[in-house]
Image (spheres, grey):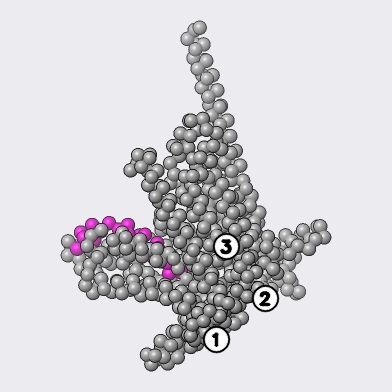
Amino acid sequence: MGLDDHDRDRERDVSVGEEAERHLAAAERRRGLLLALPAYAYMVVFFAVPLVIVFAYSFSTRSRTGDPTFSEVGFDAYRKLAEPLIRNVAVRSAILAGVTTVICLLLAYPFAYFVATRKPTARNLLLVAVMIPFWTNFLVRNYAWRVILSTGGPISGVTEAIGLGETDLLFSRTAVVIGLVYSFLPFMILPMYASIERIDWQLVEASRDLYCSGWRSFTKVVLPLSMPGVIAGSILVFVPSLGAYVTPAILGGNKEPLLGEYIVGQFLTARNWPVGASLSFVLMTVMLGATLVYFRSGGKNL
Amino acid sequence: MSTTGRRGGVGGWLLAGNGGLVLLFLYAPIILLVIFSFSGAKDPGVWGGFTLDWYRDLGGDRNVQKAIGVSVRVALVSTIVATVLGTMAALALERFEFRGKRIFDALLYLPIIIPDVTMAVMMLLFFTKSFDLIDAMFGTRIGKGFATVVVSHVAFNIAFVSVVVRARVAGMDSTLEQAAADLYSTRWQAFRHVTLPLIMPGVLGGSLLALTLSLDDVVVTQFVSGPGSTTLPVYVFGLIRRDVTPLINAVSVVMLVASLVLVVASLVAQRASEGRRRRELIITGEE
């Protein structure tokens, strides 16, 4: 056998090996797809298709009978969103969600800082203490405030006892904000804790060595380093507050609807599917945008 | 950790005070609710002497019992389906390359991000329109009911299960599976005896989360349930919107206890998985 033959043999071996590998890789891909297929098919049929249907309805118009129709397709429903009525609902929701976020920030930051600076045992205990309400039934947690704020209830009893007279907070914006803060406070505490806990405290010591006051080393070192947690927490509170439905329904009364209730109303009572569909689509887009910001701010590592 | 963070003085006291207030804020409402569920007064927020009447009423309330039955069945069926599908999806996404993987990945994130209300609207329109279509084609009269509730719960639960299981699979050492393959185990044997036990804490955690979400859901269920398929939260939500009675206090406490049992179970599962992880690290020599 000549040297050339040998080389040729080896070349063929290599190409046979490559082909076998390609086959193997293709088989692996098939296997992966097969494994994913049940969930994939389920999500396409029962999630992607419904999403597309809502999107389609947001471009339909309301016929004289109230039924949505596709005989005229356009941006009508989206244009309606800019009308004062809906704009007021959106602005009111955004303000309440904003106030909720700020209150959560003010309560959660010192708390997260406190937790992050405890010894490990105390730290874990405090974290579990935050997690437990977070896992308990959402409806029940909101209902609890309905009981507490009711006329003649505990809060009213306390204010009466200290001479402020009976308070009637239920069915007000204040009650809704209290309920939202209560519902979403853990969402603010947990990411904040995660980013404060990661801070290298030697940096703080260095700033103190350089004659920074305690306050100054906090604002110049700790606060900037914990910013990712602040941003992530704010998004995690603001976004669900904006679309909240259960809390305003239980604590807000029916005087001024918020976005969540308004959308539900378009389907269950007002029968204006195009407006309901377009509004829920816009809400979803806002949330998607916020989530992208959240991932950018390092939320994925939390 | 240095002493910087644990300074004493006014700042330290303020921090501790705020900590106490936050904990009070988180727990007082729940505790008060439990206390008032034993109150004899007609107003749900007023103390009127100890009584077990409301719990006795609860025991005799057919509607509540029926709703509890529906809730439990919906939660169990949707959790089992979502756990199987979600785990398969997690393994496929973490361990394989396949066509359309990125779309699948995105599709599985959406139910987590999407507002409840949007999801509810989506499912309502989907079922209404597809049932209209089927009725027109086959002359049937299908309505919303148990099946539509389960289908919707599975749709959001697959996503949550797969996120939890993926985290577990990603942190897992794949050399153990390779070792099983080297020892001539079939793929099924390797999965059954190596992969599955390793990802079990994730699967358990994911299924507990699914169970909790299913038992919690009000908005989506309200949109897709029909007569006879009202879950407990939807029934209670309806009661609250009509009129608040001490009976609701008692139902709420039952729901509270159920969710607390689930929290404790998931905390225990988490601890068990941490212990297991540590043992794995010791076995593989990383620790």
- Determine which residue is flagged by label 3: B214
Q: Which residue is located at x 42 percent, y 76 percent?
A: B28
Q: Element under label 2?
A: loop
Q: Which of B36 and B78 lies nearest the eye of the viewer?
A: B36
The tag on residue A269 is 2
Q: Element under label 1?
A: loop
Whether the magenta-drawn stretch holds residue A214 is answered as no
Gap in angstroms between the C-alphas marked 3 and 2: 26 Å
Letter of the chain that mark 1 sits on in the rendering: B
> In which image quadrant can residue A53 be found?
bottom right
Q: Residue B169 location, x and y as percent?
A: 47, 46
- Determine which residue is flagged by label 1: B42
Name of the residue lying farthest toward the right: B139
Letter of the chain that mark 2 sits on in the rendering: A
Q: Element under label 3?
A: helix
Q: Which residue is located at x 50 percent, y 42 percent?
A: B195
* Residue B264 visible somewhere in the drawing: yes
Type of the residue with mark 2: Thr
Q: Residue B231 location, x and y as percent?
A: 62, 68
Q: Which of A176 and A93 lies nearest the eye of the viewer?
A: A176
